[in-house]
Amino acid sequence: MKVPFVSFLPMEHELNDDIHRAFERVFDSSWYIEGKEDEQFETAFAKYLNINYCIGCGTGLDALMLSLKALGIKEGDEVLVPSNTFIATALAVTYSGAKPVFVEPDINTFNINPNEIESKITSHTKAIIIVHLYGQPCDMDPILEIVQKYHLLLVEDCAQAHGATYKNKKVGTFGNAAGFSFYPGKNLGALGDAGAIVTNDKITASKVRALGNYGSDYKYHHIYQGNNSRLDELQAAFLSVKLPHLDRMNKERQRIASRYINEINNPQVILPHVIENVNPVWHIFAIRCAKRDELEKYLNDKGIGTNKHYPIPMHLQKAYSNLNIKKGDLPIAEEISSTELSIPMFYGMTDDQVSYVIKMINSFNK
């Protein structure tokens, strides 16, 4: 049996007619930037999250960068980020002019470890970016306590967590601002690059919108040195088609994850730990194995697609060699990078496919 790591075909088949109608509607309008489609999606997504403002932008990276700039992060500042995440989180800090400072994760959840945060705070620390990695919410209560204690700004990276909740409150609504990615592979994905910033603060929302539009609050009037990062009408229209189906499709991911958690019983495989009071949406289902590379080859040979998130931690990437962080300095991130393996997780997986993945993982013995 062949089981791809991810497939969009089941979802695309269901939404095919609506997607085509959305394209035709935008094409016939001859309006492609900052129009009705963008406004309608922003309104709908803000309502879905129960937050005041949503501002579309070009990418998830842009969403984080614009959030930091709007909040006043600048050169000389430090921003705490988890040491185990996609590099875009750190790049957003760099592009704002600040310095990323890495905080180790909890090896069981892959998310930032609240117990490691305070030791990284200095007089230059102005903000913290938390990442709800793989679609599992961070442990928010202790994080919020630290944020309040040290008067830090909080930005949520929700690129992989559309619809996830902590104590029945959707992620993206806890901080000063939050960034979402709508890259095609996300739980809520466009048909190209797209992103959004959400916030409850009117001033932050206004600054973000201006910063993403060349620093302009109205045409040819520029109050900031901004960027060009806007959600185009086509992607907004496609997202509006998919948004009403998000919770239903997330529930299917949760059903698959439940089977993995309950039925994978290979002692060589470490399953993700889910903390209390959270409802993950399982953008990625990440397992760990000391013999990760052997397991990956075994599964690939059996026709099962896999991926590794992320095989080289950020602090060991050439891009951040200027931080002078040596191998061994962030051992938890390095341990995850060398043992993590992502197994198939997508809307439309059949029971037979899920069963086959479970069977093959359980039969691995090397």
Image (cartoon, helix red, strand yellow):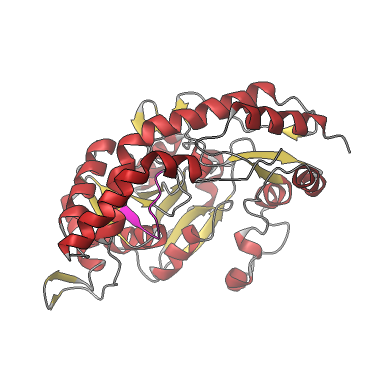
Query: Quarter of the image containing the N terminus?
Result: top right
Classify residue 235 as left or right of residue 222.
right
Residue 176, how many percent across, how many down? Answer: 30, 48
Residue 173 makes an appearance in the image = no
Location of the C terminus by quadrant is top right
- Whether the magenta-drawn stretch holds residue 15 is answered as no
54 in relation to 249, above or below? below
Residue 23: quarter of image: bottom left
Left or right? Give the position of 47 relative to 175.
Answer: left
What residue do we see at 75% from left, 24% from top? 265
Q: Nearer the viewer, residue 163 or 115?
A: 163
- Image spot of residue 227 (x, y percent): 29, 72
In this rendered view, identify the residue nearer to me: 210 or 120.
210
Q: Name the residue at the bottom extreme.
A: 220
Q: Which residues are magenta?
A: 188-196
Q: Residue at x 45, y 47 (%)?
A: 186
Residue in the foreground of this view, choosing between 120 and 103: 103
Picture coordinates of residue 270 (x, y %)?
71, 33
Q: Please give left or right for residue 306 compared with residue 236 in the image.
A: right
Measured from the top left, where is residue 282 in percent x and y? 52, 36
Residue at the location (43% across, 63% down)? Answer: 93
Q: Is residue 209 above or below residue 121?
A: below
Q: Inspect this view and state whether residue 203 appears.
A: yes
Q: How many numbered tags mark residues here?
A: 0
Q: Is residue 189 magenta?
A: yes
Q: Main secondary structure of the magenta part?
A: loop
